[in-house]
Image (cartoon, rainbow, N blue to C red):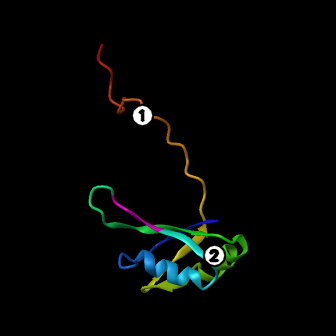
């Protein structure tokens, strides 16, 4: 099960997430999302857990708790919305 973890302190590492979520079951991956240009953390991550019931327990018990002095937002990750393909039009007027 894929879990969204938001409102993270910039000091939180992927290892911190694994340690925190491992208390509820096996963590298969933890991925901090970083800015493509700067490489700095964006303040959210995704944690993948093998067992769905362990993941649900982790969500219910960790949502609102503090990690590195920030209250985490923890919930089931929603599928990424399709943003559509690149059309090449940046919203300006076309010139013919």
Q: CA distance from mark 2 to mark 1?
A: 35 Å
Q: Determine which residue is flagged by label 1.
A: 86
Tag count: 2
The disc at residue 45 is none
Secondary structure beneath disc 1? Answer: loop
What secondary structure predominates along the stretch shown in magenta? strand
Residue at image location 70% in from the left, 70% down from the top: 52
Choose between 50 and 55: the one closer to the eye: 50
Mark 1 residue crowding within 10 angstroms, few (<14) / some (14–19) / many (20+): few
Which x, y percent locates residue 81? 55, 47
Secondary structure beneath disc 2? Answer: helix
Q: Is residue 78 left or right of residue 37?
A: right
Q: Is residue 18 left or right of residue 41?
A: right
State which quadrant residue 55 falls in: bottom right
- 53 versus 82 height, above or below: below
Q: Residue furthest top?
A: 96
Decide which of tag 2 and tag 1 comes sooner along the chain. 2
Q: Is residue 55 magenta?
A: no
State which quadrant residue 11 falls in: bottom left
Q: Is residue 61 left or right of residue 36?
A: right
Which x, y percent locates residue 1? 64, 65
Q: Which residues are magenta?
A: 31-35
Residue at image location 60% in from the left, 86% down from the top: 23
Mark 2 residue crowding within 10 angstroms, few (<14) / some (14–19) / many (20+): many
Which x, y percent locates residue 84? 50, 37
Residue at image location 44% in from the left, 75% down from the top: 14
């Amino acid at each position: 099960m894929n879990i969204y973890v938001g409102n993270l302190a910039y000091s939180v590492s992927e290892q911190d997430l694994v340690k925190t979520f491992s208390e509820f079951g096996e963590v298969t991956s933890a991925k901090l999302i970083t800015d493509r240009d700067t490489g700095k953390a964006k303040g959210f991550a995704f944690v993948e857990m093998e067992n769905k019931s362990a993941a649900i327990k982790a969500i219910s018990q960790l949502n609102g708790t503090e990690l590195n002095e920030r209250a985490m937002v923890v919930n089931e990750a929603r599928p990424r919305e399709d943003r559509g393909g690149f059309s090449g039009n940046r919203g300006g007027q076309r010139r013919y």
